[in-house]
Amino acid sequence: MTMPKLANYITKDKIEECQRLIDTSREGFFDDIAPILENLRGIMDAGQLTEKQIDAMGTAAADIQSHASLFGYQLIAALAGQLTALLASKRFDNERKTLLVRKYVEALAMACERRINDSGGTVGELILKDLAAATAK
Amino acid sequence: MMPYTVKPLNRSAPTLRIDKIQVLVVVGGEKAASLIKSIFEQLGFRNLMVAYDPDEAVAMMREVIIDLVVTDAEIRAAALHSDTEDGEAPPPEYISGVELVRHLRTSPSSPNPYIPVIMLVNQATAKSIIDARDSGVNEIVLKPINAADFCLRLIHVVDHPRPFVTADTYKGPCRRRKQVALPEGQAERRLREVRLFRHTHRWQNGTL
């Protein structure tokens, strides 16, 4: 007995519709994450971070990282990934962590404002290197 | 004698119940999960679950019978806890997407070592591909995500399941895509091979 194949169900039309979903999501990426970034900036303006705020920021950063990486937005994904790790890190005191997190949030906001949808070239590399060095201190 | 009736055998052609396939999506955030879920829904899948870290995924697999896992190679837990207070190695309970698959394949406490897994991999570097392949994934989808490639990998997993092999250093779907003879003098490394037939899957007509 011939078994039915998934290939027969996944038609060309369905694949094209899926691609449209991906394209629409990609086109709306920067508008989608703008409010998240605004929220992150708002938290930073309040001063020292509380544990609850750190958790909320970690979730938001992980959300941005996974979403950006789906589209190959390497710089934004890398910044958000490093921010997630930084927020989870127990290596820094609150004051130092707040300072570093602010740097990452500003870098992320800048990358999103400029709609950098790749690695950001040499400037992107420098930003990542600079932030990594600041975090390593 | 008690009367009895004989139920006629169901001779109708089997159908593929896509809507019954239980898919678990393991990604780091809601927005990525939402997009992947939308893609599956567009294809006709209806039973979709989301886990935001590997621990949650394993816990869900213990509760519900999952037919297919789609996982990101870099999940939130992979980045989290990258260091500890004294700079030691990360605690073992936090695992990445690659480690999740390795756990599923090899751990004695795995909820299902044979579960088909599709992994979303960030960069097409040799290391990331080899890491994913050697962890025991069935298929790899490279990012940026593309519908045609994603569907092709999905079709491969469902329509052409590869034999599941167990060797000293590997457990997962056979990594040999081509049927070629062993090199001369090379002994067979596979200790065990389990052939997975499509009609044994739960989602075929009559088994669900």
Image (tube, rainbow, N blue to C red):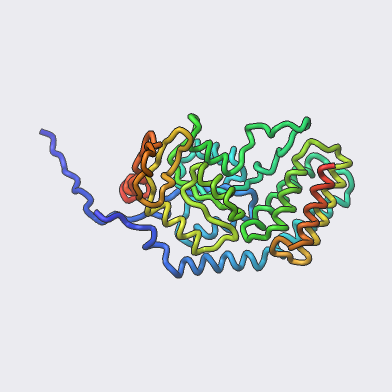
Residue B119 position (above or below residue B4): below
Q: Nearer the viewer, residue A66 or A117?
A: A117
Q: How many marks?
A: 0
What is the residue that sits farthest to the front in this orientation? B185
Indicate left or right for B3 with A35 as reference. Answer: left
Q: Position of residue A110 (x, y in %)?
A: 80, 61
State which quadrant residue B113 falls in: top left
Residue A49 position (above or below residue A34): above
Q: Position of residue B16 (x, y in %)?
A: 35, 55
| Quadrant into which the C terminus of chain A falls | top right
Residue drawn where x is 32% and y is 51% of the image: B205
Q: Position of residue A70 (x, y in %)?
A: 61, 57
Residue drawn where x is 39% and y is 61% of the image: A7
Indicate left or right for B133 with B157 as reference. Answer: right
Q: Position of residue A133 (x, y in %)?
A: 82, 47
Q: Nearer the viewer, residue B176 or B181?
A: B181
Residue drawn where x is 45% and y is 55% of the image: B154
Residue A18 position (above or below residue B123): below
State which quadrant residue A73 falls in: bottom right
Indicate left or right for B110 with B165 as reference. Answer: right
